Amino acid sequence: MALNIIVCIKQVPDPEHYSKVTLDPVTKTIRREGIPAVINPVDKNALEEGFSIRDSYSGKIAVLTMGPPQARRALEEALAMGADEAVLLCDRAFAEADTLATAYSLACAVRTMGHFDLILCGNETADSGTSQVGPQLAQFLGISCVSNVKEITFEEEMSLVAKQSLEGGYMKVRLRLPALITVRKEINKPRLATAFGIIEAAEKEIKEWCCKDVEVDSNCIGSAGSPTKVLEPIELPRRKGEIMTGSPEEAVKKAIEKVRELGGLT
Amino acid sequence: MEQRRGRLLPVCFELLGKGQELCQNLGAELAAVLVGNELGELASELMDYGCQKVYLAEDPRLSLYQGDLYTDLLSQFIGENKPEIVLWGATTTGTELSARVAARLNIGLTAHCIDLHIEDIDGEPRLVQVVPGWSGNLAVKIISRTTPQMATVKPGLMSKAPQMKVEGEIILVAADLIESVIASEAKQSRAETIEVVEEEAEEMPLEKAEIVVSGGWGLNAAGGFAPVEEIARILGGAVAGTRPVFDKGWIPESRMIGISGKIVSPRLFISLGASGATQYTTGFTGSQVILAVDQNPNAAIFEIADIGIVGNLQTVLPLLIKELKGAA
């Protein structure tokens, strides 16, 4: 029997360019202009895990993302890596959603996508890192979930054991499908898109769905459907931030003296 | 309150410390909820830390964390008891469980708060949840429009509760609620926790190191991560890094500093080639002394450092190594 797998991914500002991200003083959302967008790094491990399960049991991998029109790029890359189908959930009405409204919107899209056996996500995103959307999505779909998983072992086709990483150890959880799993980076090493993959991907269709294409309660999406509300940014206490002057040699010498003075080195 | 094998995790006491403070401001009662089996002793321990009520849900079938069961049980419990505020530790299971309960009850949840306090908002006392912003010393305030107001707190960030003995009471969560939850999940649930395995701690956990040397992605253009390792070796400190460095596989996750990694407060924290995203800096603001090296004089890292060196990393790092070697 073949498995239907959905991998949820997110497009995020490239973590290598973090220093250029700023907060919009008016809308209080983050400004990403000029910052390259990439697939959230650990979401590639979720894709890879899907591919290796498909290799063992056959089946298909559908990749889902919610985001602005340019999030299509992330889907193209996922298709080039080897995903079979892609859905972009894209509508102004979904914008500025918190984790709950995001998970609800994704759940509506998953229902529209039809039958699935397994949903895979990364365990956290590089931009907000809440780790909440995966478990919340599972809850909206009424399925079991295990988060922060470092190893998946199939016992038989519809049953697996997931090793969930804990502080100072791990937990083994047996899951009967359908279920949702969020994976950690150490679970595998994601493949790169190949030239052949890129050519193949051009033939694959990306479905773009707006609010009307999925059955949603418009009170539960976007900013209106988000129970948390962002207020103003605040400044945390600063330190002195004394920059050492002089030639590099002098600056280094002074810095070490200063560290000693403050008790950092004995 | 998360417990493992009958012991409370350290983050429990950090939550109780914040809980005591919030309750004083609100004139509210501090309660704790324990789920597991044979936890009576822990319940008494919690009353030494200011808990006026300790709710105890006990059953042999609850002794290990079971995601579906715990979600169902706590959602029903919170729905019936209507607390104003619910705080959770941002551990693996705390994060998963709080997110599932939030979705089940359709309420807000803010992850990884670095501060929590009460403010008057539109004439009503609300829980202000402070999370890291994007750079340097910037943070963002978030409130919940729903009740209970729920937030998770990263272990190691808040101070532990002082002892505060109160006349508390232990309230057993009704056996018929537990029984009905177990019965309904037995029919529906497709997940079962088989075992919990404790692994031996690392030889030198990052949180215990007196000196931490941490590298950022700026090192990539300056020849790599080796200087971090060398400086750590000279000083007998621990090696650490930022998220981009972890993403590139230079360090294991157990060495990643920040709100989604480790929180440390060593005697000396040295940051090399990191610009200072708040997600990162939140992980070490409690350090006694912070020394930062970066080539960008406007980098946010210098706002939270005590001492800064601005300069080309390829010039400065060898000098730093030489100087420290001479001094060591």
Image: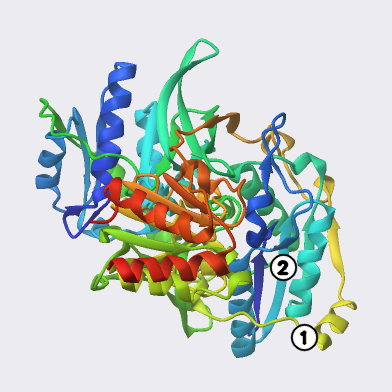
Q: Which residue is mark 2?
A: A63
> Where B294 falls versus A206 (above or below)?
above
Q: Chain of mark 2?
A: A
Residue A180 visible, this orientation: no
Residue B229 visible, this orientation: yes
Residue type at mark 2: give it.
Val
**Residue found farthest to the right:** A203
Q: Which residue is mark 1?
A: A194
Give how far apart the Cα atoms at labels 1 and 2 are.
18 Å
Toward the viewer: A251 or B158? Answer: A251
In the image, taking residue B28 as reference, residue A251 lies left or right, namely right
Circles 1 and 2 in contact, beta carbons < 8 Å: no
> Where B5 falls versus B307 (above or below)?
below
Toward the viewer: B67 or B19? Answer: B19
**Which of the image's four quarters has the N terminus of chain A?**
bottom right
Q: Chain of mark 1?
A: A
Say what secondary structure mark 2 lies in.
strand
> Where B318 falls versus B2 (above or below)?
below
